Image: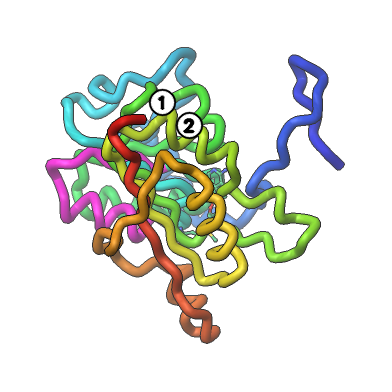
Amino acid sequence: MDRLNSQTGQRAPPRSFVRRSGRITRAQKRALEQLWPVYGLDEFPQSLVLSQAFGRDAPTVLEIGFGNGETLVRSAAAAPEVNFLGVEVHLPGLGRCLLLAEDAGLENLRLIQGDAVEVLKKRLPPASLAQLRLFFPDPWPRKRHHKRRLVQPAFVALLLRVLEPDGVFHVATDWAPYAEHISSVMKASTAFERLSRPPSRNATKFERRGSALGHEIWEAAYRLRPSY
Ligand SMILES: C[S@@+](CC[C@H](N)C(=O)[O-])C[C@H]1O[C@@H](n2cnc3c(N)ncnc32)[C@H](O)[C@@H]1O
């Protein structure tokens, strides 16, 4: 059944995730209690001030739906001069990511628990991201679920809001019909040009899973034209 917006009473757009309870290990629970104050950004009433959240001014990369955080943490460890922000709904994933961040001694990582759509809409300041990464988003393969896919024209409007001029949207999937969908949604926007080669990145857990199933990996990066 469709959700209703509690303020307007209108139908809210379907979410790209279902809340899974998932088992939390003792170590993840400890991480959520002790490390969240270090890396976590709690509900903030107004727009997030990135220079305050990170304690410095630096280019910021956002990863949406980082899963267990393995790729996010490796990227942050490899580029200490860059701020990395991760948004994820799944609590055990956040716990796992915190543990990896602690092991790596990261200082350039901050995490938000919640729906990335809300973060892009309301929390991030306009033109604040150098890169937005979306690696192996849920493909929602059934036709009646396609509206749950994150990449839609409304998502492109949010990209236009949060990316800096020349900012890059980097996306990868192992689900060919979703790749076609993303490609056509992005092609329809004159604000973006596809780069001839995406930036280098580390493999993700879901990517390995897709590859093991024989899925072909599709990947693309789109640059926001500075005139927009
Ligand atoms: C298929 S998994 C991929 C995880 C990871 N990127 C990887 O490649 O291993 C998709 C992840 O996106 C998260 N997710 C889906 N919709 C989201 C949203 N709107 N905001 C934040 N996270 C979301 C899910 O909880 C899930 O962990």
Residue 226 lies left or right of residue 181; in this view the side is left
What kind of element bears circle 2? helix
What kind of element bears circle 1? loop
Under mark 1, the amino acid is: Leu
Residue 130 is situated, as x and y percent measured from the top left of the image, at 27, 38
Task: Look at the image and say whether residue 80 sits in the magenta stretch.
Answer: yes
Q: Nearer the viewer, residue 25 or 162?
A: 162
Residue 41 is situated, as x and y percent measured from the top left of the image, at 40, 29
* Residue 120 tag number: 2
Bounds of the magenta segment = 69-86
Q: Where's the N terminus, which quadrant?
A: top right
Above-or-below relation of 68 to 13: below
Q: Which residue is mark 1?
A: 124
Task: Look at the image and say whether residue 115 sits in the magenta stretch.
Answer: no
Q: Nearer the viewer, residue 184 or 27?
A: 184
Label 1 near ligand 1 (CB < 8 Å): no
Under mark 2, the amino acid is: Leu
Residue 11 is situated, as x and y percent measured from the top left of the image, at 80, 29
